[in-house]
Image (tube, rainbow, N blue to C red):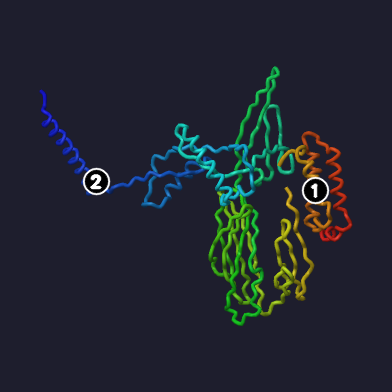
Amino acid sequence: MILSRETRKRGYNMKTFILLYFLGLTCKKVSAMDNSTKVYYMELRTEKSIPDNYISDILNNFKIDNPVSVDTFKITTVTVDGLLTIPGEVYYESLSNPQSAEYMALYNKLLPQMKALYSTLNSFDNIRITGFSQNKTNDVTTGTESTVTPTSRNFTVVLRQASEVWEGLYMCVFNPKSSNVTIKHKASATLDIALLPQIDISSTPQFPDCSMVQNEDTRILVTVQCEINNIAENYQVTWSTTHTESPLNNRTDVTSNSIIYRIDTTVSCRDSEKPTVTCTFMNILSQERNATVNIPVIYQNSNSCKADGDWPKAKAEFQAVLKCKDGIGKRKRLCLNNRYWNDEISNCNLAIGLGSVEKNAGDIFSRLNSSTFTPNSINTYANINASVSILSTMYNVINASQNNYTLNDAQLKDALSSSSNLLDGALKTSWDISI
């Protein structure tokens, strides 16, 4: 039987009506008889090393509508990390700071080119640049912080003290030789260290002055800062206080070399209180490190030393601390109980900086010789101590060298010259401080 076009059209309309009617009854039943269910499709980006059960716990505690049930949990995306070497580009220190103009300019230049290339790959989703670093390769050898144990088919590296200098891409290369043909077998892996920072904590002013205040209920504004090196590590930072107002105006400043966390608080001019502030840094493994600063308040009955040059007015029996102007470290000076300043103690030293003895010994001894050539440039205990430590460390490293390394004439000359410079009579005072 052949149906007319009009009859077929009416049949299609009837099918549609029946389908909609059925859905209406179903929806009405769900609405009247049972609770409806919302389904959320979520995407969570994590590091590959995090166990699946941890991720499931995170999703189960997600605050949407309680209770939350996680179903069909699947790893759907694979993230590949790697390094690209860019020839012809000069590395500047400012490229280590994601906030710098140089970083953003290079980032905006390279990312579109990389997206255009990687988008040709199957299943490509996204690409991002996580940072720039200098293209420098160091040999890992036995030294003060590492031990390399070789066998014919295996090399083992043990790090006794993991720090940020050991982070990066590790590559091992085996070169078996046969019939004058060399085949290089390479493997690589990235070492990411969950670091705890070295914290430099200080307050401004160091000594809040209540000596001229008539009302002991007066409060003085104090800024406390915790400074750490600008490294690729995310920390959760918390603050705690004793005998101070709750932290105000929490803020962060980022430079190419450091990250500074600051808070404002107030201290009371009441004599009985001893205010302190503590900052705590927690890394991705929930490990913590903290630093505390005591805030010595100069009360009306307190002895104090007058300001002297760049040294501020200080409370008796407390040390004033200043940053070094032309080096790394701190200058300290004790305010005595008789209201006179003691002599300054300078812990300033020159910036001192992994690799094989063969490749670095010459540079180290040459730089040490240059640094110690003028007595005035190292006339602090810290510099004397650092220089002696370098000589002692190089002695130990050379003795531990797997290649039985010996100094050449130029390196030996620089080492002896540095030793002679350190024994210069003009440095007698700096030597005496350490005794």
In this rendering, is residue 177 above or below 278?
above
In this rendering, is residue 309 above or below 96?
below
Q: Quadrant of residue 27 in the image?
A: top left
Which is more N-terminal, label 1 or label 2? 2
Q: Position of residue 414 (x, y in %)?
A: 84, 45
Q: Position of residue 280 (x, y in %)?
A: 59, 58
Q: Amino acid at mark 1?
A: Leu
Q: Quadrant of residue 199 in the image?
A: bottom right
Q: Secondary structure at mark 1?
A: helix
Q: Which residue is identified by label 1?
A: 368
Q: Quadrant of the N terminus?
A: top left
Q: Quadrant of the C terminus?
A: bottom right
Horizontally, residue 244 falls left or right of residue 336, namely left
Looking at the image, which residue sits at the far bottom? Answer: 214
Q: Position of residue 9 (x, y in %)?
A: 14, 33
Q: Nearer the viewer, residue 210 or 284?
A: 210
Q: Position of residue 406 (x, y in %)?
A: 83, 37
Q: Secondary structure at mark 2?
A: helix
Q: Residue at x 77, y 43 (%)?
A: 363
Question: Within 10 Å of the Cα at label 2, are there few (<14), some (14-19), or many (20+) other Cα atoms?
Answer: few
Horizontally, residue 292 falls left or right of residue 395, namely left
Horizontally, residue 46 falls left or right of residue 95, namely left
Q: Amino acid at mark 2?
A: Val
Q: Which residue is identified by label 2?
A: 30
Distance, label 2 to label 1, CA atoms, is 82 Å
